[in-house]
Image: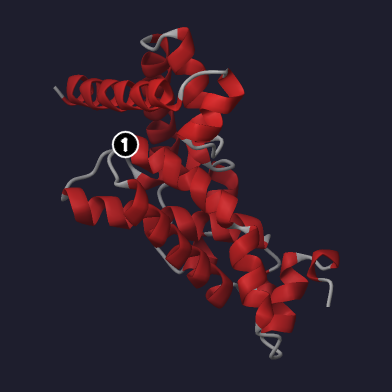
């Protein structure tokens, strides 16, 4: 079968009818999304290799648990499942929260409306809408302060990194040495930590 001709939702129906190779197809198709989510969480306190593995676990759970009859886009369901798996891994590793999960979803995902819509599928407690709006505003303010404190190079590196590129790919795009991009990412990560401490203090 030519799986590219089918929607994700149609593929999941076929998977559950015994077309087992669809699992590998979907896992490969969504690896770039896992990379994008992993990059964002790495910047706020995770270890990259472990996070990639956790992200793939989240993707597997999304494929396993998606309910076609709910008529929600699989892409957005997978996005939330991957994000939650990654965020749980960071929390378990660091034993402390960095930012609220819903705020993270709103910044690096596709918005609060879709996140709230997906709560029933995920079977978890729905956040109070007013609280969610407040958290989003806090994170947007944090992001503006962070961006203002970055050099023009660091701003470009951060933008490409959050889109899912690794430091080697960013180096090629920007015509820089990979080491200089890696150093920029480390500086960005340190500035995030410094700003987090300042905001808490």
In front here: 103 or 26? Answer: 26
Please tell me how many numbered marks the rendered image carries: 1
Give percent across and percent down for residue 72: 67, 62
Q: Quadrant of the C terminus?
A: top left
Colour basis: secondary structure
Residue pointed to by mark 1: 44
24 on left or right of 152: right
Whether residue 28 is visible to the viewer of this picture, yes or no, is yes
The residue most toward the bottom is 18
Q: Quadrant of the N terminus?
A: bottom right
Q: Quadrant of residue 17?
A: bottom right
49 w.r.t. 155: above or below: below
Give percent across and percent down for residue 22: 68, 76
Give percent across and percent down for residue 33: 57, 50
192 w.r.t. 97: above or below: above
**Residue located at (44% from left, 25% from top):** 140
Whether residue 103 is visible to the viewer of this picture, yes or no, is no
Q: Quadrant of residue 73?
A: bottom right
Q: Quadrant of residue 65?
A: bottom right
53 on left or right of 176: left
**Residue located at (64% from left, 67% from top):** 26
Q: Which element is circle 1 on?
A: loop
21 w.r.t. 100: above or below: below
**Residue located at (38% from left, 25% from top):** 179
Give percent across and percent down for residue 185: 37, 26
16 on left or right of 126: right
**Residue located at (43% from left, 24% from top):** 181
Pointer 1: residues within 10 angstroms few (<14), some, or many (20+)?
some
In front here: 38 or 10? Answer: 38
In front here: 108 or 125? Answer: 108
């Amino acid at each position: 079968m030519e799986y590219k001709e089918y929607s994700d939702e149609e593929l999941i129906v076929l998977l559950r009818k015994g077309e087992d190779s669809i699992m590998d197809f979907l896992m490969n198709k969504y690896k770039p999304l896992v990379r994008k989510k992993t990059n964002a969480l790495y910047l706020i306190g995770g270890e990259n290799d472990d996070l990639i593995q956790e992200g793939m676990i989240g993707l597997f759970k999304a494929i396993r648990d998606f309910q076609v009859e709910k008529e929600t886009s699989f892409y957005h369901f997978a996005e939330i499942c991957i994000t939650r798996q990654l965020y749980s891994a960071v929390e378990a590793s660091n034993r402390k929260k960095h930012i609220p999960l819903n705020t993270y979803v709103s910044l690096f995902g596709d918005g609060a409306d879709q996140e709230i819509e997906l709560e029933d599928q995920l079977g978890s407690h729905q956040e109070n809408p007013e609280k969610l709006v407040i958290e989003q505003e806090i994170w947007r303010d944090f992001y503006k302060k962070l961006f203002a404190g970055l050099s023009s190079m660091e701003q470009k590196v951060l933008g490409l990194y959050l889109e899912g590129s690794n430091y080697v790919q960013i180096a090629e795009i920007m015509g820089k040495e990979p080491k200089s991009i890696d150093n920029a990412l480390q500086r960005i990560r340190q500035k995030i930590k410094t700003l987090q401490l300042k905001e808490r203090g």
